[in-house]
Image: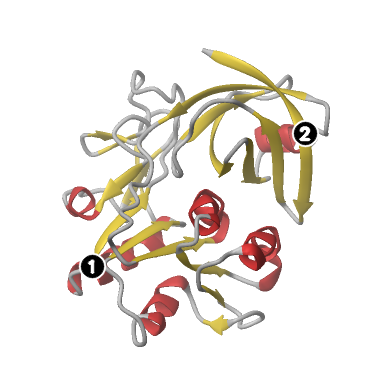
């Protein structure tokens, strides 16, 4: 079922745009919605806030996100969902949240809930959209950039290794580029740390029918997008191959 919502707020930093709207659906952190507006195809987007006011945050990288990025306060969007399996936060576990690049957006709701969080990006400018949430966070927040322009100089996995020299965590909840997740998963397995990770694949229907988002025998839209450490360990394509819109398996370079 599609709901029509009205954009109540907009912010943009470089090529990253956020749109806010009132929507009375209950959403778990990590779940996604299918978004449509005139001038674009329907696309999947995770929510970057899940309270009374919802928001979607996305990088403008193609004609559909370009069209979505032109929407202003008062414009209307069609929202379908929420879909998928989100993060399962266990209050009895010491949990570290890790977000990389635009993958920071889906973990912002957990930062708002007070979980310790590590944020990583290529440069300081790519973190601008997340800094207001980081300033309000009640948990500990660490920042890293590949070029050293803000915080620790290094990538997300290197930052996590530095954090764990001083603190202990039972579980890591992560979202980001698959290359980041691949090496973070490897680190978690080697060190006996449980993890949940949000994976991304080309997605069309969003509800488990078309099969376009398969990774091995899993449907990212229905079985995920958040998968456990054990589930990911059994995925041969994780970190190695994706599928294009035609369903052709394409190796990562």
**What residue do we see at 40% from left, 58% from top?**
174
Element under disc 2: strand
Give the x, y percent position of residue 199.
Answer: 38, 47
Question: For mark 1, what is the residue?
Answer: 193
Give the x, y percent position of residue 205.
Answer: 44, 21
**What residue do we see at 37% from left, 40% from top?**
225
Position of 27 relative to 17 (above/below): above
Position of 45 relative to 173 (above/below): above
**What residue do we see at 23% from left, 67% from top?**
193
Q: Residue furthest top?
A: 1
| Alpha carbon distance from label 2 to label 1 | 40 Å
* Location of residue 20 (image quadrant): top right
Q: Residue furthest bottom?
A: 165
Element under disc 1: loop
Question: For mark 2, what is the residue?
Answer: 8
Position of 159 relative to 238 (above/below): below
Residue 72 numbered tag? none
User: Can you say which quadrant of the picture contains the C terminus?
Assistant: bottom left
Q: How is the image coloured?
A: secondary structure
Total label count?
A: 2
Q: Is residue 83 left or right of residue 12?
A: left
């Amino acid at each position: 079922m599609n709901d029509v919502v009205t954009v109540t707020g907009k912010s943009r930093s470089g090529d990253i745009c956020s749109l806010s709207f009132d929507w009375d659906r209950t959403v778990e952190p990590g779940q996604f919605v299918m978004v449509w507006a005139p001038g674009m195809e329907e696309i999947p987007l995770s929510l970057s806030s899940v309270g009374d006011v919802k928001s979607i945050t996305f990088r403008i990288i193609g004609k559909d996100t370009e069209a979505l990025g032109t929407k202003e306060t008062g414009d209307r969007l069609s929202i379908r969902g929420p879909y998928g399996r989100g993060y399962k936060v266990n209050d009895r576990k010491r949990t570290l949240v890790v977000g990389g690049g635009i993958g920071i957006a889906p973990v912002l709701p957990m930062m708002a809930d007070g979980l310790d969080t590590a944020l990583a990006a290529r440069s300081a400018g790519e973190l601008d959209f997340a800094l207001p949430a980081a300033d309000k966070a009640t948990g500990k927040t660490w920042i890293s950039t590949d070029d050293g322009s803000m915080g620790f100089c290094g990538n997300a996995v290197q930052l996590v290794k530095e954090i764990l020299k001083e603190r202990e965590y039972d579980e890591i909840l992560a979202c980001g580029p698959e290359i980041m997740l691949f090496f973070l998963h490897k680190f978690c397995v080697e060190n006996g740390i449980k993890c949940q990770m949000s994976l991304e694949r080309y997605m069309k229907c969003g509800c488990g029918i078309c099969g376009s988002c398969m990774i091995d025998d899993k449907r990212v839209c229905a079985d995920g997008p958040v998968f456990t450490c054990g589930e990911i360990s059994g995925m041969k394509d994780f970190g190695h191959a994706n599928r294009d819109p035609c369903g052709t398996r394409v190796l990562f370079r």
